[in-house]
Image: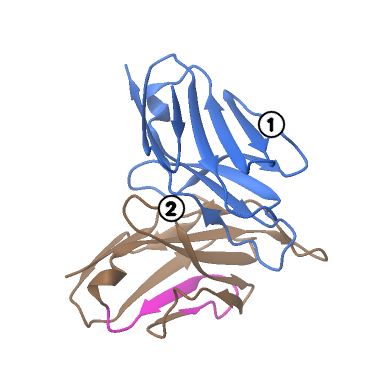
Chain colours: A brown, B blue
Amino acid sequence: DTGVSQDPRHKITKRGQNVTFRCDPISEHNRLYWYRQTLGQGPEFLTYFQNEAQLEKSRLLSDRFSAERPKGSFSTLEIQRTEQGDSAMYLCASSLAWAGQGGDGEQFFGPGTRLTVL
Amino acid sequence: GESVGLHLPTLSVQEGDNSIINCAYSNSASDYFIWYKQESGKGPQFIIDIRSNMDKRQGQRVTVLLNKTVKHLSLQIAATQPGDSAVYFCAERFIYNQGGKLIFGQGTELSVKP
């Protein structure tokens, strides 16, 4: 399967615990996006990387959230001191941006990690 | 059947009928629009896109219409099938901005009755 993969698919944790999610993008894609989706709503942008550089972060991304893409391939999203309001589906997407114009190709989404904070 | 995506989140149609899902987008400067289909437990799946210099684009059984005057986007699905049952989201972005973040609408749940 050459699509975007995410691990784990489901995570249940207690309030106050730290959690980390992983995303493996399509191998040749240089952009990687994280979105959060709550029940009945569309995904909301959190942050994105071009190669290993984190280029934009949403105001939704509080200080408790941190994302990395150390080698420009897979990415991790960590949430520290989880709160019940963090319960959501965390989606990763990747795309191939073409050089010189700042343009971006189609974003391919992974299956998501569903986080439940008790 | 027809729905206003952001105000009437559920659309129920008979198998074989045509479906129309509507979306009002927010930013008049957006120049690229996409429709996604999301099935339960899965990530959004690309259906069709359209650039702001077009007003209509057709795919296989799907057509997207763009009305920039009223910032309105619609998705038409011909001969709706049970496999089309899902939540449909419209999304907008700037195609040539520094990043390609998508801004999604609320979504419309399509239910196809056999």
Amino acid on which disc 2 is placed: Gly
Image: A27 above or below B71: below
At 62% across and 32% down in the image, what residue appears?
A: B64
| Residue B27 placement: quadrant | bottom right
Which percent across, then down, holds residue A64?
A: 37, 84
Q: Which residues are magenta?
A: A67-82
Image: B13 above or below A21: above
Q: Is residue B85 left or right of residue A116?
A: right
Find disc 1 in the rendering and name its residue: B57
Subunit of label 1: B
Quarter of the C terminus of chain A within the rendering: bottom left
Amino acid on which disc 1 is placed: Arg
Q: Residues within 10 Å of mark 2 (few under 14, many from 20)?
A: many
Q: Does the magenta run of residues contain A5?
A: no
Subunit of label 2: A
At 44% across and 43% down in the image, what residue appears?
A: B6
Q: Residues within 10 Å of mark 1 (few under 14, many from 20)?
A: some
Instruction: Tell me, yes or no, whether dots 1 and 2 are on the same chain.
Output: no
Find disc 2 in the rendering and name its residue: A42
